[in-house]
């Protein structure tokens, strides 16, 4: 009987596999589910010319903001950037290309990428700025937009628990985009707060099967960025 591989790796080695110019999906909805430690290592290693796909641009001084402020991001595909002054300024000054997408459509484009579909059809965004430059079709007399599927060179995701094969479990809303992104990228790197032996995660608790995950990086500390934002 063949044993399952141990996919644990150091954060440094895992991020080193991400090249310049990569398209990277980043899990998270604001703070919950965002892989802050993986993002900080990406910043430290210096990869540039990146295209990032994330629900939001995080807040100033957190997560994606470090990469945007350092000029390392060429394009951002997101649902909103209103909490990040650096992202807004970079977009307005032409230093950052931003593609806005309705939140549900972003999730569905990622899901389609993971399912191997080339695109989805929707009436969301018709006759709005979100439809600019997009192909339109008509199905049974109904006008629809063609929203292309999203795939990435790498996905950076955050899990609460993982075993050494890469089976993942999340906590509540920290799940958000992470499972979808794990299915839609060539290289999937997951940071985990707790690392369990194979079999330590009950089958019914697995929310992302290890077959989708390439590298597991145990966290040795939880920084302030992971805390709940208080206003």
Image: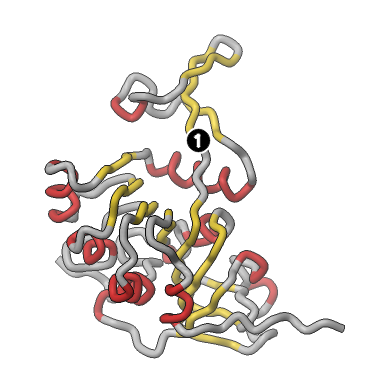
Whether residue 116 is visible: yes
Q: Residue at x 18, y 55 (%)?
A: 84
Q: Residue furthest right?
A: 1
The foreground one among 162 and 202 is 162
- Quadrant placement of the N terminus: bottom right
The part of the image, by quadrant, that contains residue 86 is bottom left
Q: How is the image coloured?
A: secondary structure
The x and y percentages for residue 203 are 69, 74
Q: Would you name the residue on which mark 1 appears?
A: 148
The x and y percentages for residue 158 are 44, 71
The x and y percentages for residue 187 are 54, 64
Q: Residue at x 36, y 25 (%)?
A: 131
The x and y percentages for residue 134 are 41, 25
Q: Residue at x 48, y 61 (%)?
A: 154
Whether residue 226 is visible: no
Under tag 1, what secondary structure? strand
């Amino acid at each position: 009987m063949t044993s399952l591989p141990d996919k644990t790796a150091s954060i440094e080695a895992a991020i080193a596999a991400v090249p310049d110019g990569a398209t990277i999906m980043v899990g998270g909805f604001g703070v919950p589910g965002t892989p802050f430690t993986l993002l900080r290592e990406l910043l430290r290693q210096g990869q540039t010319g990146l295209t990032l796909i994330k629900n939001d641009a995080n807040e100033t001084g957190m997560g994606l903001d470090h990469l945007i402020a350092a000029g390392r991001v060429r394009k951002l595909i997101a649902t909103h950037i209103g909490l990040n002054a650096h992202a807004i300024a970079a977009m307005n000054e032409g230093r950052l290309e931003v593609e806005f997408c309705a939140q549900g459509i972003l999730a569905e484009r990622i899901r389609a990428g993971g399912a191997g579909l080339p695109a989805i059809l929707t009436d969301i965004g018709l006759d709005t700025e979100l439809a600019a430059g997009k192909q339109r079709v008509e199905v049974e007399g109904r006008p629809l937009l063609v929203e292309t599927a999203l795939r990435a060179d790498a996905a950076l995701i955050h899990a609460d628990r993982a075993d050494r094969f890469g089976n993942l479990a999340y906590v509540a809303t920290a799940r958000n985009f992470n499972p979808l992104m794990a299915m839609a990228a060539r290289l999937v790197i997951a940071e985990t707060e707790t690392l369990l032996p194979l079999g330590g995660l009950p089958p019914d608790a697995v929310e992302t099967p290890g077959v989708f995950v390439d590298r597991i990086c145990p966290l040795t500390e939880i920084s302030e960025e992971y805390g709940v934002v208080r206003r």
